[in-house]
Amino acid sequence: MRMPRFLQRHAVLIEPFLGNSSTGPLYGPAVEVRGLLEQKTRLVRNAAGEQVTSSSTFRAPLETVAPAKSRVQLPDGRKTTVIAAVRQDGAGLPVPDHLEVQLQ
């Protein structure tokens, strides 16, 4: 089941992390993505398995591209970085499939 439009209350800009170059990190063009933003501090695990503090979670449509280290601009203008993006696939159950983007 796709993420319903009524849950897509917030718009953020995501610049997907493409990798590193000799001059620093490379990012793709900024894309506006609508989803549900929850600004709540919690502990999450990063790609290395370490516990880090996440200040916000953004729930976006499953097809959203937001790999770890991507840059994100929140609706209030604050800029942050993706810690991890976790697929939440309902596997046919009547729950919305979405991408849970954990933000620094």
Image: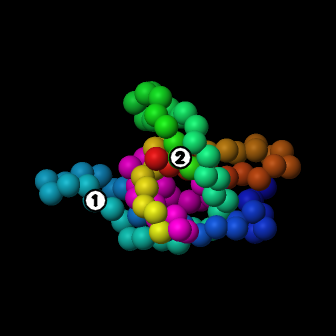
- Asked if residue 47 is positioned above or below residue 85 in the image, the reply reads above
Task: Where is residue 53? Give x, y as percent.
Answer: 49, 37
Amino acid at the residue labelled 1 = Leu
Name the residue nearer the viewer: 41 or 65.
41
Q: Secondary structure at mark 1?
A: strand
Q: Which residue is mark 1?
A: 26
Q: Residue at x 43, y 55 (%)?
A: 80
Name the residue nearer the viewer: 55 or 4.
55
- Asked if residue 5 is positioned above or below residue 23 in the image, the reply reads below
How far, Cα to Cα, is label 2 from label 1?
A: 24 Å
- Quadrant containing the N terminus in the rendered view: bottom right
Q: Which residues are magenta?
A: 58-76
Residue 61 colored magenta? yes
Q: Quadrant of residue 86?
A: top right
Categorize mark 2 by other alpha carbons within 10 Å: few (<14), some (14-19), many (20+): some
Residue 8 colored magenta? no
User: In this view of the protein, can residue 23 be seen by the observer?
Assistant: yes
Point out the residue furthest to the right here: 94
Q: Residue at x 65, y 53 (%)?
A: 38
Name the residue nearer the viewer: 52 or 46.
52
User: In this view of the protein, can residue 61 be seen by the observer?
Assistant: no
Task: Where is residue 23? Give x, y as percent.
Answer: 15, 57
Position of 67 compared to 23: left or right? Answer: right
Position of 53 compared to 98: left or right? Answer: left
Amino acid at the residue labelled 2 = Ser
Marked residue nearer the N-terminal end (2 or 1)? 1
Q: Secondary structure at mark 2?
A: loop
Name the residue nearer the viewer: 80 or 18.
80
Q: Which residue is mark 2?
A: 55
Task: Where is residue 74? Give x, y as percent.
Answer: 52, 64
Q: Residue at x 42, y 52 (%)?
A: 81
Task: Where is residue 97? Give x, y as percent.
Answer: 72, 51
